[in-house]
Image (cartoon, grey):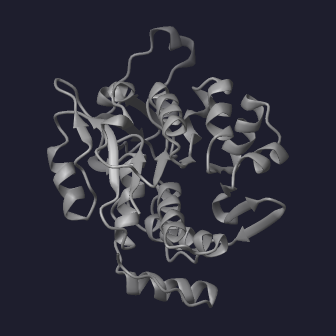
Amino acid sequence: MTIVCTGSIAYDYLMKFPGLFKEHILPENIESLSLSFLVESLVRLRGGIAPNIAYTLALLGEKLPIVFATVGEDFYDYGQWLAVKGVDISYIKVIAGEFTASFFANTDLANSQIASFYPGAMACASEYSLTELKIRPDLVVISPNDPQAMINYVEECIDSDIPYFYDPSQQIVRMDGADIRRGVENAYSLFVNEYEYKLLLKHTGLSEDQIRSLVKFTVVTCGEKGSIIYMDNEIIEVPCAVVQSIVDPTGVGDAYRGGFIRGFLLGFDLASCGRMGAVAAAYCLEEKGTQAHTYTIAEFTERYQQNFGIALNIKEQ
């Protein structure tokens, strides 16, 4: 099967300030606020939802998952790294004169953050059409991106009768409720976290029963409580996998999606897909960065069996 992952690609620039922001903010002078913090560390990490999902798919044996997105002229090294890891980067479009989307976060000792997000080349995603694909995908993942691009990809999938997994997540607060509803109504499945699910219900006016009647299944991730899969009248609860140490939660939801989708492509039942997502998420949670974790298929299946007492048979394509 050919899977196409659409969504953001970004660099995460993470800094640490060895103090407390609140000690340097004067409420009585807030109107003339002007501060500069000398940080003690800076790391640049690979990120973005589309490559995060594709990276996990490749780890689990999916042959050349396609990332379809826009990036800036600073993407070359990142792209070559993804290619080495087994991700198809041939449909990642470089926008001349732009930087790849970037997230800048400065964190203090209280874990308070001052952050900025620059969309950069991601803002051009709406000008990049799925019709430029030279193959017909069996499945498209529509994840957070430029809002207009997400709207376009929904319509293009509908027009071409291509099934898509809809993952509006972070962009629920930016998109119009009618556009989100359109995405849900025509999706094969819906992926959101617990809080986003409530927001989606509010913004679209859809009820939980209506959503269940529209999509084949809905996956709701619930943090340390695991995940819940709704299919027709069935509710499947999936616990988290055991984590050795919590290092960084960034990208854990994307890793879950990658694990789940790989199971789906292999034809596994939804409970098994959810458990694969849980194990993939655990690996991500134990490392700093969204693509710092690695494992062999043998290691993954062993951890799956240790957690759930069930054997898992994954073969590379």
Q: Which residue is drawn at 47% across and 25% down?
A: 148
Depth check, front residue: 222 or 156: 156
Residue 258 percent location from the top left of the image: 47, 61
Visible residue check, residue 62: yes
Residue 134 percent location from the top left of the image: 28, 45
Residue at the far top: name it: 31
Whether residue 85 is situated above or below residue 76 in the rendered picture: below
Visible residue check, residue 13: no
Relative to 43, 227 lies left or right: right
Residue 10 percent location from the top left of the image: 33, 41
Residue 190 percent location from the top left of the image: 63, 49
Q: Total marks drawn?
A: 0
Point out the image quarter for the C terminus: bottom left
Relative to 100, 313 lies left or right: right
> Looking at the rendering, which quadrant does residue 307 occupy?
bottom right
Q: Residue at x 62, y 91 (%)?
A: 309
Q: Residue at x 44, y 65 (%)?
A: 284
Q: Residue at x 22, y 48 (%)?
A: 90
Whether residue 227 is situated above or below residue 95 in the rendered picture: below
Point out the image quarter for the N terminus: bottom left
